[in-house]
Amino acid sequence: MTANDVTASNSTAATITKKPRRKRRGGLSIQSKLLIMLLAVSLIASVIVGVIGFISGRESLRAAAIDQLTTIRELRVSEIETAMQGAQDGVALDSRNLSAQTASIAINAGWDDLQNRTLTPAQEAELEAYYADTFNPQLTERTGDPYSDTAFLPTSNAGKWAQYHLTSKFTDFDEALNVNDGGDGTPYSAATEQYGDYLSRLVTQVGYEDLLMMNLDGDVVYSAYKGVDLGTNLNEGPFQDSKLADAYREVVATNSVNAVMTTDFERYIPSLNVPTLWVVSPIGNDSQVTGVLAAQLPLSTINDVMTGKERWAEQGLGETGEVYLVGRDHLMRSISRELVENPEDYAAEVIANGTPPSIADRVVQVNGTVLLQPINTVSVEKALQGETGTSISQSYLGGENITAYSPVEIDGLDWVAVARIDTAEAFNPVNDFTRNLILSLLGIMLAVSVLSLLLAQVFTRPIRKLVEAVRGVAAGNLAVEVPQGSRDEIGDLGTAFNDMASSLRIKQELIDAQQEENQKLLLTLMPETVAARYKKGEETIAEEHDNVSVVFAELVGFDEYTQTLSGDQEITQLNLLMRGFDEAAAKTGVEKVRTLRGGYLASSGLIVPRVDNVRRAVDFAKEMRAVVERFNSQHGTQIDLRAGVDTGTVTSGLVGRTSLAYDLWGDAVSLAYRVRSVTDVPGIYVSQGVRDRLQDSVGFTEAGTVDLRGKRQSVWRVG
C-alpha cells in the first residue's frame, strides 16, 4: 500500500466517521416548493378568470355609463335646437302679422314727426342727468368701467325726444313695460299707446326679455322696456358695432320678410352689459318691408333647457353631471351646475384648473358663466371641429370626467354641447363590481391556500422522514432505515436509501479494520519524510494530488480601465477586486493558491478533499464574475472576467529555499489556463472532464478546442 493509498483511505474514513454535520443550506424546502406550485397554479387560474371577468364587467359598466351620458346629451341638444327653432319661428310670425305691420307704419310716421321737435336746454340737461346719475352708475357698477354722460345719448331729435319722455322717466324696467304714452301729445305717443299693449303682451306672454322695433333707417323706434337703445341708430349710433346691429343690417339687405337672423350672446350695454341674444326678422309682407322686429331671448330659456330646470339628479346626471353649451370663442353659453349648487367652491376649482382669478370672481359675483367661463377641454376642441363622440379627460373644474360632445345645429349660431359627469361617480358601479370581485378572489385564494397547505404536508411527509434518515447517516448513524410505505417513486427512493446505508455499513467495517494500520503509516511516513527532505537541502518539495479542480481566472479590460489611474489608485482598485475574490473563495469552500496582477489561481479539493470539488470550482468562478459585476455597478466600469476550470491530478509543494512559495502545477493547471483563453469573450470555460462530471446540472455551450500534449480537448462555456 502506497502513501497515497493510505492517505486516500484515511480521507475516506474521515469523511464517513469524522465529517461534521453540515448546516442546512438556505433555500426552499420541497414542501414549500410544492405549496408554491399548487398555490401558483390555482391562484393564477383564479386571477385569470377574475381578470377576464373584471375586464368584461368593467367595460360593460363603462359602456353603459357612456351610453347614458350620450343619450342625455342628445336629448338636451334636441331640446335646445327645438326651443331655438321655435323662438325663430315665433319672431318670424310676430313680424309678419297685421298688427306688427300697422304698428310699424304708425310708429314710423310718429317717429318722423319727432324729428321736427327739439328739447329745450333744460330738458336736454335732465336727459344728461339721467345718464350721469342713474344709468351710468349702474353700468359702471356692473362693468367696472367709467362712461361719459353723453356716450349713449342719441344724436337725432326724435331719439332725444323719445328718451326724455320715456326712458329717463323710469328707474324700474318692469314699470316702464306698462307705459307706452310719453304724455307729450305727439303722434308718436299716440301710436305707441295704441299698439304698445300688443307689443308688451308679446313680451309678457311669449316670454321675451325685450322687444325692439326699428325703421329702415336704423332707428330704434320702439323698446318694450324703454331702454337706452330707444332712439339710437344701429347704423351710426353707439351700438352700431353690436351683433344686434349686424343682424339688423343683414335682414334689411335681404329685403325679404322671410329672413330670420339669430345673434350669438354678446354683452349688450343697454341691458347693463348682461349677455344678450337676439332673434331679428323684417316687418312687412310680400309687398313691402316697413321695419325690423328684434326679440331678446331670456338667458333663463337657454339655462332651463340645458339644466333641465336644475333637476340634474332626477334626469340621470347624478351628483356631478351637467350639460352645457360653448361657443366658438371657447366661452360658456349656459350656466355651470357647480356654480348653481356650490358657488363657494366654484372659484377655487376653476382657478386651480387655469381660469384667471378675476374671471372666476366675476362669475361668482354675477352668478353666471355665460361669456365668462373659458372651456378649453379636449371635448370642446373636438366638437368645435365638427366631431361627435365621447372621451375621458379633464374637465374645466379640474377633475377627470366622462364627456359626450357634439355640435349644435341652430341657424346663425356656432355652438357645441358637452355632457359631462365625474368619472368617480360615473364608474362607481365599476368600483363596486371591482370591490366585490376582489373580495371573492381573496376568499377563493384563502380556501386554495389552506387546501394546498394540507396537500403539501401529506405529500412531503415521507420525504421528511427520508431527510431525517439522511441526516442520521451524515451524523454517523449507519444503522438507520426508512420505513417502506408507498409504492411510488418516493418508495423506490426509500428502498435505494436503505440499500445505500447497508453498503456504507459494510464499507465502514472494512475501513475500521484498516484504520489502525493506516494511521500508523501516515504518522511515520508523511511528516518525517517531508521534514527530512527539507533538512537535506532539496530545492523543491512536492506532493501529487488526485481529483483536484483548478480555477485559473484573469480580468478582462482592467488594463484599459487603469490607464487613467495613478499607481496608488490602481493598487486600491485591484485590492478591492482581490478581496472580493478571497471572500468568494471562502464562501464556496475553495482554496486560494496565488494571485497575479489581474489574475487568480485557486483549487478545490487540494487541502480538504471534497467529493463535489468540481461543482465548487464552477460556483467559485460564477461568484468571481458576480464580484466583477458589483464592482462595475459601483464604479461605472466595464471590466469582465475570463476563467478556466479543469479537474484532475496536480502537484503542490514548496518552491525555492531562501524565499519559500507554495505553488500548484500539473496538467490540470495547464489545461485550466488554456481553456480560459480559447476565446477573447469573457465567461467561464471548462474542460471536457469538468463538463462530464457536472453533466446536466449546469448549462453548457461548446466554445472550441485546445491542444494539450498533442491531444485536442473540447472546451465548453458555462451558461
Image (cartoon, helix red, strand yellow):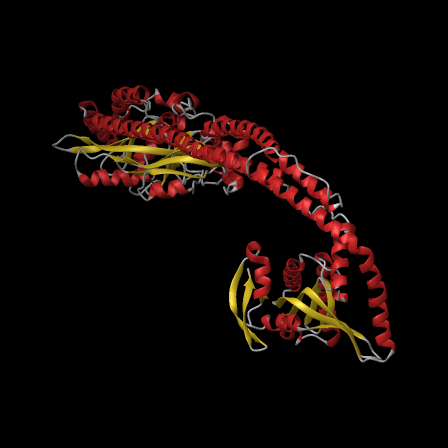
- From the viewer's side, name the closer residue of 410 and 513: 513
- From the viewer's side, name the closer residue of 68 and 111: 68
Task: Please state the horizontal and vertical placement of residue 166, each as a whole percent of the image.
Answer: 36, 27
Give above or below for 307 relative to 610: above
- From the viewer's side, name the closer residue of 717 and 267: 717
Q: How many marks?
A: 0
Quadrant where the C terminus sits is: bottom right
Answer whether residue 575 is visible to the viewer in this image: no
Quadrant where the N terminus sits is: bottom right
- Position of residue 74 in the picture relative to residue 557 (left or right): left
- From the viewer's side, name the closer residue of 11 and 371: 11
Considering every residue shown, the one lying at the far right of the view is 535
| Quarter where residue 497 is shown | top right
Task: Please state the horizontal and vertical placement of residue 521, each as a whole percent of the image.
Answer: 82, 63
- Position of residue 483 in the picture relative to residue 435 (left or right): right
- Position of residue 13 in the picture relative to residue 106 (left or right): right
Answer whether residue 380 is visible to the viewer in this image: yes
- Position of residue 672 in the picture relative to residue 350 (left or right): right
Give above or below for 705 relative to 437: below
Task: Please state the horizontal and vertical placement of residue 77, each as a whole percent of the image.
Answer: 32, 31
Task: Please state the horizontal and vertical placement of residue 115, each as a whole percent of the image.
Answer: 27, 35
